[in-house]
Image (cartoon, rainbow, N blue to C red):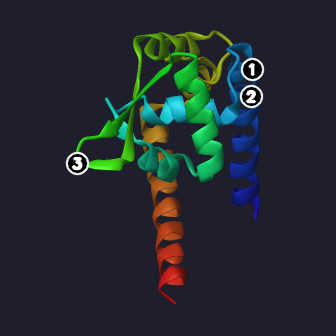
Amino acid sequence: MQLMLSFAQVQKNMVRFIQKSASEKGLSIPQYSILMTILNCHEMTQKTVGEKSFLPKSTLSQAVDGLVKEGYLDRQQVEDNRRETLLSLSEKGKALVEELHLQEDGLHQVFKAASEQFTNEQVEVLLQAHQKISTYLAEVELEGAAK
């Protein structure tokens, strides 16, 4: 139970930094989440963004519309499947994400500083532990879905 509460506490603190950063840039939390989800890919379908961000379809659609309207995202239909929408960061979106990453009191910089307290070996052990927990939870979820 203590381990689970520890994860919850870290998540709660991270969400507070996300809320602050998002509101300072005029973003909602779903919009922030979408930008961070797309960041490491050149482009991604809206369906995939929804799966990775766990946002409900209506929330995702409204957030994407707002990001497109503000010029942070580019949206186009997939050639072979007109029902699919392809999303990518615009130049303005890339600049915004860069600002969010460099924001002195933002999540990325604060988390970087916090993680620098650990040795490389400690980080590796922590990553392995997180991976074991994540893998186990995913397996249990799959087993439950198969029943």
Identify the mark at residue 80; answer none if there is no mark: 3
Q: Position of residue 43 (x, y in %)?
A: 34, 33
Picture residue at 44% right of the left edge, 52% below the top? 128
Nearest the viewer among 86 and 108 is 86
Identify the mark at residue 23; answer none if there is no mark: 1
Q: CA distance from mark 2 to mark 3?
A: 37 Å
Q: Label 2: which residue?
A: 19
Picture residue at 64% right of the left edge, 37% below the top? 30
Nearest the viewer among 53 and 2 is 53
Amino acid type shown at disc 1: Ser
Q: Is residue 15 above or below residue 81?
A: above
Q: Label 2: few (<14), some or many (≥20) within 10 Å?
A: some
Q: Marks 1 and 2: CB-CB under 8 Å?
A: yes
Foreground mark, 1 or 2, reads 1
Give the side of residue 68 with respect to residue 79, left or right. Answer: right
Q: Earlier in the sequence, mark 2 or mark 3?
A: 2
Amino acid type shown at disc 2: Gln
Q: Is residue 124 above or below residue 103?
A: below
Q: Is residue 112 visible?
A: no
Q: CA distance from mark 1 to mark 2?
A: 6 Å
Amino acid type shown at disc 3: Asp
Q: Label 1: few (<14), some or many (≥20) within 10 Å?
A: few
